[in-house]
Image: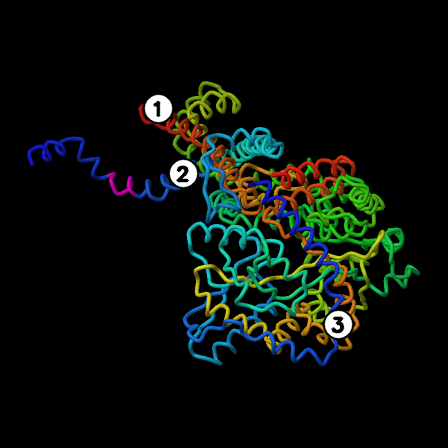
Amino acid sequence: MKKLIATLLTGVMTLSLLAGCGAPGAASTAPAAGAAEASEAGEPVAASEDAAGDVTIWYYWETAGHQEALDHIIQEFNGQQDKITVQAKYVPFADFKKQLSVGASAGELPDLVILDNPDHASYAAMGIFADITDRFDVSTYYPGPVNSCTLDGRLYGVPFGSNDLVLFYNEDMLADAGCDVPTTWDELLDVAKKTTKDNVYGFAHCALQNEEGTFNFLPWVWSTGQTSYEIDSEGGIKALEFEKSLVESGAFPKEAINWTQGDTMNQFISGNLAMMINGTWQIPTMREEVPDLKWNVAFIPKDKQDASGLGGENYAVIAGGNEEAAIAFLQYATSKDTCLYMMEHMGYISSDSTIAENQFDGDPVYQVFVDEMQYANARGPLPEWPDISDAISLAFNKVITGESAPADAAKEAQATIDSILGQ
Amino acid sequence: MKKVKTFFRYDNIGLLFILPAFIYMMVFVGYPILSNILLSLQDVSVRNLVKGEKHFIAFANYVGLFQDAVFLKSVKNTLVFTISCLIFQFLIGFLLALLFSKRFSFAKTVRGLTMIPWMMPMTVTALMFKFMFSTDVGIINYIFTKLGLIQSNIEWLTTPGTAMIAVIVANVWIGIPFNTILLSTGLTTIPQELYESASVDGANSFQKLTRITLPLLRPTIESVLVLGFIYTFKVYDLVYVMTEGGPVNSTHLLSTYSYKLSFDMFQYSKGSAVANVLFLILLLVGLLYLKITMEGEED
């Protein structure tokens, strides 16, 4: 039985990786006119007439703008009808997983949660999310995000919105150093060295020993053509070696192992970093905080192929909660105008291809993110993903701090990964 | 009826008085402990927390722990952390207590001010020290550089060895006031006459310290050390905020590792097994404390 489950999981995983790569191609080719019609088609499949009562949402966005945007659409929904009352509760990200686990065992959960997509499979496997396969239509959504809400072929959530990682660079600093925007690893290392001076580091990405760090590190591995589960491989070791050469060149601050993505962004906009890897959601904040800073974005420099990390949140309806009313709210929240409003304020790319297509008309910065989406890989989905992620983040932390040689760190990580997958 | 009366006649009436406290302890302390022990003997993970069978696997989690390098490391870290903190905060706290026992102006005010670290929320302290130990902008590297002690900045929180030093320093800073106050209180119980007559007999300050102060302060010192051990052994928030157990697990304590296993990695049973190891050690130290205080009361 266990073997069967393992085989199934591996199958789902592989499929999702393939799907993740191929997905967003559809976005750039589909005709713009089809957008409105398609979102019409996404109307409630099984919207119940008697959906009523209170719906509580848990979410973890700490940025004021994000909280206000969510609050705005909730107020609008509550004002439009008088059967359902939605309210949102903020749970800090650091506590979010704990609260869900504790709530799950105590049976005290909200009706709807908005959670980080790599964790989705774990909670779906735990059985706290309602199976909404025939109750919500996701046919117009990108396959990558949809996969992250799917377990064993059943749909346990709805993608909220997606984001991916790209290279941010300070135009003035690169110009001063006489450098072009790097497109390969060698160029990145070279430009990073040249832009490092005084209190400015050439390049950094969040390298925390947790999911956030893994998210930022994995594009190196994927760029070599290897998967998240093949760390002790030519490509995996090469990625670790590259990380090591960045640190040893002095252009990459070791302190990045204690930087969140937000910290990294702050270093960048304070002028302490010439280049960084970061995500879509930082754009609204950066534009507001430092309107005069000249920065731009480009694809993440590559080894063999383009690669980026797929991030984002999913909605999940809690099993046994007020499911009907929660789904009714989801129908509203994912409708075109509401979704666009949220995406704009959040700095996210809609997971609904019909909405995403025209989302960033004429905004070249966002366009880079949309273009990079087709190379963005999902993490998991796998209920044990947190363990895999922990092994990977330990490996690059060992390399960055100089505790282990890349080959040794890779071997150790692989042993952990194999023992998890082999269960 | 007669039986009931007899039962409550002498000492037994006391049992009735402790009943509310007993019930409270059983519900809010006893039950969680028992439930945690049970959890650690099962195989509860992400797949069967809510649904599915929870198999009883006896001590397999504990056996697994002792083959887990991170667990062994966190046991070692916890001991190093606790013992280093105890030594430094006791020594500094004791010296401060001796200082404040001198009757100089503002002695009481200044002693009160030293309590501030103890009252400050742990996370605030942790964030403050995280800033101070930062490699490029931290004040500690700045001072060391200005004093000419170091050539290049020390990477305090990003190098395994120094990260441990940094969290120990932060925790010592928090622990000093606790030691100072308890030891100061202990010092006031020593009659001044003893010192006066010792002076008459020609004892110097060092002899007064070793022959009068230390022996008479022994019960206080024992309590301070045992309580300090308990408080330090279960530190969680300080380390979680400063390093999150990193870099490369070098500052994981039993408390932070247990949290990580349970709530980051969904290995609930293994996480609770770590918590129980922590509990067992503290239970032993707690019993030792009870023994010391009981002996003290008999004296």
Asked if the residue under mark 3 is in contact with the one under mark 1, i.e. CB atoms within 8 Å, the reply is no
Residue reaching furthest to the top: B201
Q: Which residue is mark 2?
A: B33
Determine which residue is flagged by label 3.
A291
Pair 2/1: label in front: 2
Q: CA distance from mark 3 to mark 2?
A: 55 Å
Q: Which residue is mark 1?
A: B295
Name the residue type under label 2.
Ile
Q: Quadrant of the C terminus of chain A?
A: top right
Q: Chain of mark 1?
A: B
In front of the other: A395 or B109: A395
Q: Which mark is residue B11?
A: none
Mark closest to the chain's N terminus, 2 or 1: 2
Q: Residues within 10 Å of mark 3 (few under 14, many from 20)?
A: few
Magenta span dominant secondary structure: helix
Query: Are callouts 3 and 2 both on one chain?
Result: no
Q: Position of residue A287 (x, y in %)?
A: 72, 70
> Mark 1: which secondary structure?
helix
Chain of the residue under label 2: B
Quarter of the figure with residue A297: bottom right
Q: Tell me the distance, in whole angstroms, between the alpha carbons under discs 1 and 3.
A: 70 Å
Classify mark 3: helix, strand or loop. Answer: loop
| Type of the residue with mark 1 | Glu
Note whether B30 is above or below A355 in the view shown: above
